[in-house]
Amino acid sequence: MTESQNTSKQKINVLVVDDEKSILKLAQRLVRQEGYDCLVASNGFEAIEVMEETVVDVVITDIAMPEMGGIELTKHIKENYSADIIMMTGYFRDLSYENAVTQGAKDFIQKPFSTKEFQIRLNRVIKERETNQELKQSLKRMNEIVDGVINSLSSTVDARDPYTAGHQKRVAQLAITIARFMGLENTEVSSIRMAGILHDLGKIAIPAEILSKPSTLSDIEFSLIKTHPQVGFDILKNINFPTPVARIVHQHHERIDGSGYPLGLSEEEILPEAKILTVADVVEAMSSHRPYRPGLGMDKALAEITKNKGRFYDPNVVDACLEITAKNYTFDG
């Protein structure tokens, strides 16, 4: 690859770290021949100073250097920067390819190296880096599309049930806060967010006059309302979510004593994410206005989950919710 061949690409900064001036000079020439910008440093401390001032894409570092060697430098880079690393050494006993990868390097160069080998390994690492960045951008765009679809579906429910407009988003907001407070992983929090925004999706199959009825529902009307978790699950189950979003929606009215609906699940049969969503749903629904009653307020909502802690609601989730709301928690919107 020549410099002219690389002009259409985004600028790539390569930092070469070595205490041998002859190696620095050779590596700098080879890097520039490939069309990349090249920075140099003679030890780990100098390399860190460079990276504080300039965004570096790839670091090629020797292992044995004074003051700070390549292993320590690699550890520091992995903890503080996003650069990829190629290790190199003139002493085979110091490091192998397997050792280098274990330390966090993307590749390994044994000195003395041929110019062709050096450039092939550098280009491979840069190509892999660019591919990974493209995949991240594609995933970001895909997530934005999914978020748009999810929010549109949520808005469909709000349009048919204006009295509870925003309920799903407020439930998702509280559920996310509880999940993070409880230390759930990011993937689980994301799953709860999507399920929270969609948990009442099944209400699109219920007549609008029932959803907005300003008086107590009859037994038949309430039996129709109770179908919405199943309907929501049926709509979502064929979407290949990376997490169990459809099952969480299906279970958000289950109770740990088995008295919930539609499946009558209990205890460990209920997903942890669904247990969180259940508590958030009850608290938001009780504290907010409904067609058939004014909002009961946060105090009564919290009294409900406290009274039925360990019966209907998971004790750990209730405790987390109570701690969160004790700090003057408020719903957005």
Image (cartoon, rainbow, N blue to C red):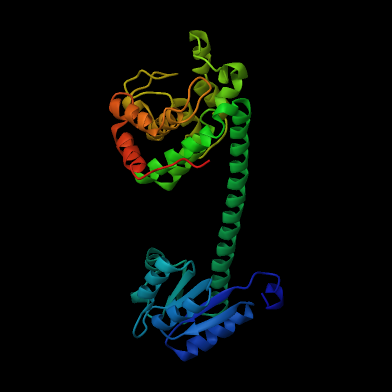
Q: Position of residue 15 (x, y in %)?
A: 51, 78
Residue 114: percent from the left, percent from the top? 53, 80
Residue shown at the point (39%, 76%) measured from the top left: 70
Residue at left 44%, top 43%?
189
Q: Residue 225, position in %: x, y?
A: 52, 17
Residue 25 visible? The answer is yes
Query: From this viewpoint, which residue is outermost toward the bottom?
Result: 21
Residue 303 lies left or right of residue 34; in this view the side is left
Number of numbered callouts drawn = 0
Compared to residue 44, the image places residue 100 above or below, namely: above
Q: Is residue 188 visible?
A: no
Residue displayed at 41% across by 31% down = 297
Of the pair 45 and 327, the residue shown nearer to us: 327
Q: Nearer the viewer, residue 102 or 158?
A: 158
Q: Which quarter of the rendered picture does the N terminus lie within?
A: bottom right
Relative to 189, does residue 27 appear above or below in the rendering?
below
Image coords of residue 281 (percent x, y): 44, 30
For residue 160, above or below residue 5: above
- Quarter occupied by residue 237: top right
In depth, the one of 71 and 196 nearer the eye is: 196
Q: Which residue is at the far front?
A: 294
Using residue 98 as the reference point, say whether residue 8 is left or right of it: right
The residue at the point 49 percent across, 80 percent down is 16
Query: Quarter of the image holding residue 152?
Result: top right
Q: Quadrant of residue 110?
A: bottom left
